[in-house]
Amino acid sequence: QVQLVESGGGLVQAGGSLTLSCAASTSIYRLGTMGWYRQAPGKQREMVATINNGGFTNYASSVKGRFTISKDNGKNTVYLQMNSLKPEDTAVYYCKALSLSVWGQGTQVTVSS
């Protein structure tokens, strides 16, 4: 079974930056489009960013211009660079292969004001 392991979360002040990593137990190229999602307390899980095998990216309007998704096929790892963080970015962040119903355990991001 495919495993996805997120890391890199933490506590940061507003305006700061974090980089999240998602390590897959198999080839992310074979998994196809990869995405980052987040879930804040009391809210539904939402898509943050996706990237396909051609490198095409898509972002939620709330993070466009601040977050960058990327991947390293050789390391089977997907990244989410988050800049200019805001308190409303506080959530548990998950990565997912869109072709599978598999979620990692998530990594907590907390942005203080």
Image (spheres, helix red, strand yellow):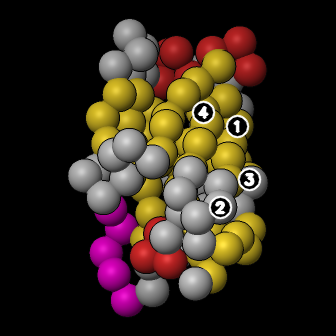
**Residue 97: x %, y % from top left:** 45, 37
The residue singled out by tag 3 in the image is 7
**Which secondary structure dominates the residues rendered in magenta?**
loop
Nearer the observer, disc 4 or disc 1?
4
How many C-alpha atoms fall within 10 Å of the one at disc 3: few (<14), some, or many (≥20)?
some
> Magenta segment range?
42-47
SS at mark 1 in the image: strand
Mark 1 to mark 3 CA distance (whole Å) = 8 Å
Mark 4 to mark 1 CA distance (whole Å) = 7 Å
**Three-letter residue code for mark 3:** Ser
Foreground pick, 55 / 76: 55
The residue singled out by tag 2 in the image is 16
Foreground pick, 27 / 65: 65
Mark 3 to mark 4 CA distance (whole Å) = 11 Å
Q: Which mark is residue 23?
A: 1
How many C-alpha atoms fall within 10 Å of the one at disc 2: few (<14), some, or many (≥20)?
some
**Residue 45: x %, y % from top left:** 36, 68
**Three-letter residue code for mark 2:** Gly
Q: Who comes first in sequence, dot 1 or dot 3?
A: 3
In this figure, what is the number of numbered marks?
4
The residue singled out by tag 4 in the image is 78
